[in-house]
Image (tube, rainbow, N blue to C red):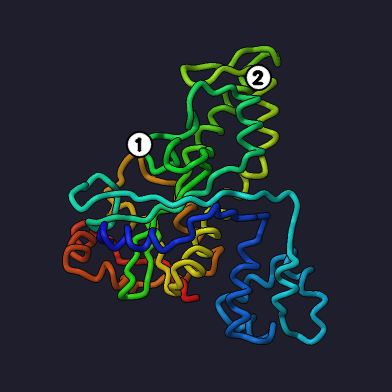
């Protein structure tokens, strides 16, 4: 996407604080809300690409009261599972036309959608981990929220990067990533090596103990299990509600690594580009996104001897 186009798009987005509540499997409710606009009956939804969502135990339980065989918006809106949390959504910009190291599939700018923690988390984080600076579990070379970007600061759980083509009416999800999940996993391994609760755990950016680290890890354990689910759900909700676009593309693991020039130890977890999109009813296709149907992209894939396979979701 061109920088000026993205600036105009960001200027049209809501300026007030955007909260995003999420609990386990809430993505299924979001997708069923979309499906229910096209398919009036549960039987019709079963025959669609969204049919697999009906097999989830939490959804089966929710729909057990649908005596007339139809899904109501009121019923779907009542869904909630504990433990749940509320995130803060923020946006940003990533890349440039000349930066070949920005890990974008084509030259240009990506919109960044961030999933930031709420005040409750950040308070627990400061009381337990005692950071001496912002972003101790994030890499400042990545598109995380920085102090000064907004009137208030929150730590970043994860982000997605979106390549948007408004003329074609489609979006490519370039990546979903979290530094925080990786670094918290590292913190947990460090804590497990401690002999007592009083053992210190400290480095240049924070200073805590095994007991306090354990307290924090217990607090965030539910978020560790659902972070990728929550991030992709928030991304699809943003594309549908704020951008009004209905065709969403998602990289396959091999194609994404090739087009974004990711190699060696820098490659992302395979599950983020295989099981995660399938969970959200994306369908694997040999079709190229319209925004990547150029000779340059095709030539790069042929050079790498990689089939052009992408995940596609039509809302």
Q: Give 212 or 145, whichever is nearer the viewer.
A: 145
Number of the label disc, if any, that sits on residue 210: 2
* Number of residue marks: 2
Q: Bin the neighbour count of mark 2 within 10 Å (Cα to Cα): few under 14, some 14-19, many 20 and up.
A: many
Q: Nearer the viewer, mark 1 or mark 2?
A: 1
Number of the label disc, if any, that sits on residue 166: none
In this rendering, position of residue 167 left or right of residue 248: left
- Figure check: 142 above or below 18: above
In this rendering, position of residue 27 left or right of residue 312: right
- Figure check: 125 above or below 307: above
- Looking at marks 1 and 2 on the same chain, the residue that comes earlier in the sequence is marked by 1
> Marks 1 and 2, Cα distance to the nearest angstrom?
29 Å
Give the labeled residue for mark 1: 141
Residue shown at 69%/76% (left/top)? 73
In this rendering, position of residue 90 left or right of residue 208: left
In this rendering, position of residue 307 left or right of residue 162: left
The N terminus: image quadrant: bottom left
Q: Secondary structure at mark 2?
A: helix
- Figure check: 288 above or below 158: below
Q: Give 178 or 297, whichever is nearer the viewer.
A: 178
């Amino acid at each position: 996407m061109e920088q000026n186009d993205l600036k105009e798009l960001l200027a049209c987005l809501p300026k007030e604080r955007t909260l995003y509540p999420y609990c386990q499997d809430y993505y299924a409710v979001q997708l069923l809300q979309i499906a229910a606009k096209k398919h009036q009956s549960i039987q019709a939804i079963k025959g669609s690409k969204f049919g697999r969502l009906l097999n989830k135990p939490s959804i089966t339980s929710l729909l057990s009261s649908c005596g007339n065989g139809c899904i109501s918006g009121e019923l779907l809106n009542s869904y909630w599972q504990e433990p749940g949390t509320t995130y803060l959504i923020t946006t940003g910009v990533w890349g440039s036309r000349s930066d070949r190291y920005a890990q974008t599939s084509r030259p240009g700018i990506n919109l960044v959608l961030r999933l930031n923690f709420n005040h409750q988390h950040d308070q627990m984080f400061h009381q337990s981990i005692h950071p001496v600076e912002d972003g101790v579990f994030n890499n400042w070379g990545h598109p995380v929220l920085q102090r000064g970007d907004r009137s208030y600061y929150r730590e970043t759980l994860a982000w997605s990067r979106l390549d948007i083509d408004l003329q074609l009416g489609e979006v490519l999800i370039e990546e979903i990533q979290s530094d925080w999940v990786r670094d918290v996993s590292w913190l947990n391994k460090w804590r497990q090596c401690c002999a007592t609760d009083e053992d210190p755990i400290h480095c240049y950016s924070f200073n805590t103990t095994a007991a306090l680290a354990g307290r924090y890890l217990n607090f965030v354990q539910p978020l560790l299990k659902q972070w990728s689910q929550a991030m992709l759900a928030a991304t699809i909700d943003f594309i549908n509600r704020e951008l009004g676009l209905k065709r969403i593309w998602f990289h396959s693991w091999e194609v994404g690594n090739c087009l974004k020039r990711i190699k060696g130890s820098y490659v992302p977890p395979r599950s983020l580009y295989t099981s995660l999109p399938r969970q959200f009813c994306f369908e694997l296709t040999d079709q190229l996104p319209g925004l990547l149907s150029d000779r340059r992209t095709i030539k790069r894939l042929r050079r790498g001897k990689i089939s052009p396979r992408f995940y596609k979701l039509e809302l």
